[in-house]
Amino acid sequence: MAPNSTDDSSNISAARTITQPAAMNSNHLYYLHPSDSPGMVLVNSVFDGKGYGGWRRAIIIALSAKNKLGFIDGTYYEPDASSTDFKQWNRCNDMVISWILNSLSKDIAVLY
């Protein structure tokens, strides 16, 4: 039997190629730095029911520095679930929620 003259190696190579998503601008509202993680603590004082004003100020400053304040003040709206931005928005929103929960005492965080 004659060998197949079609070279399938280029097809196999092309099928294995994984394209990397375009790098996101660090000023984009959905940008998360590689060091950002759900376990990150943004403020040094845990809110335990006392000192709300100081805790609030610290959280606002920290979220503003990370360009994520819009997730809690309502300026970054949740896109429609069919939107191409929904997955990224949801990921950032979950990250912000986890950062806030990490800044609450366990007694308060369990309520949310």
Image (tube, helix red, strand yellow):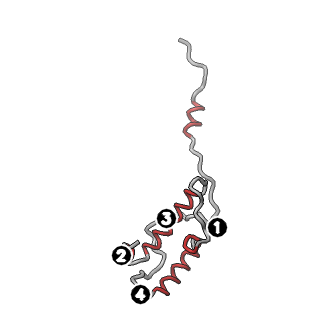
Q: Is residue 84 left or right of residue 91?
A: right
Crowdedness of circle 4 by 10 Å Cα count: few (<14), some, many (20+)?
few
| Viewer-side label of 4, 1 | 4
Q: Which residue corresponds to mark 3?
A: 94
Q: Amino acid at mark 2?
A: Lys
CA distance separating discs 3 and 4:
25 Å
Kindly indicate whether the residue at mark 1 contacts the one at mark 4 (C-beta within 8 angstroms): no
Element on which disc 1 rests: loop
**Which dot marks residue 68?**
none
Give the mark nearer the N terminus: 2 vs 1: 1
Q: Amino acid at mark 4?
A: Lys
Give the mark nearer the N terminus: 4 vs 2: 4
Give the mark nearer the N terminus: 1 vs 3: 1
Quadrant of res 83? bottom right
Residue shown at 42%/80% (left/top)?
Answer: 46
Kindly indicate whether the residue at mark 4 contacts the one at mark 3 (C-beta within 8 angstroms): no
Q: Position of residue 7 (x, y in %)?
A: 60, 25
Element on which disc 3 rests: helix
Give the mark nearer the N terminus: 3 vs 4: 4
**Which dot marks residue 27?**
1
Residue shown at 49%/66% (left/top)?
Answer: 95
Q: Which residue corresponds to mark 4?
A: 50
The residue lying furthest to the left in this view is 107
Q: Amino acid at mark 1?
A: Asn
CA distance separating discs 2 and 3:
18 Å
CA distance separating discs 4 and 2:
14 Å
Element on which disc 4 rests: loop
CA distance separating discs 1 and 3:
19 Å
Q: Position of residue 8 (x, y in %)?
A: 58, 27
The residue lying furthest to the top in this view is 1
Q: Which residue corresponds to mark 2?
A: 106
Residue 53 lies, with reference to residue 3, above or below; the image says: below
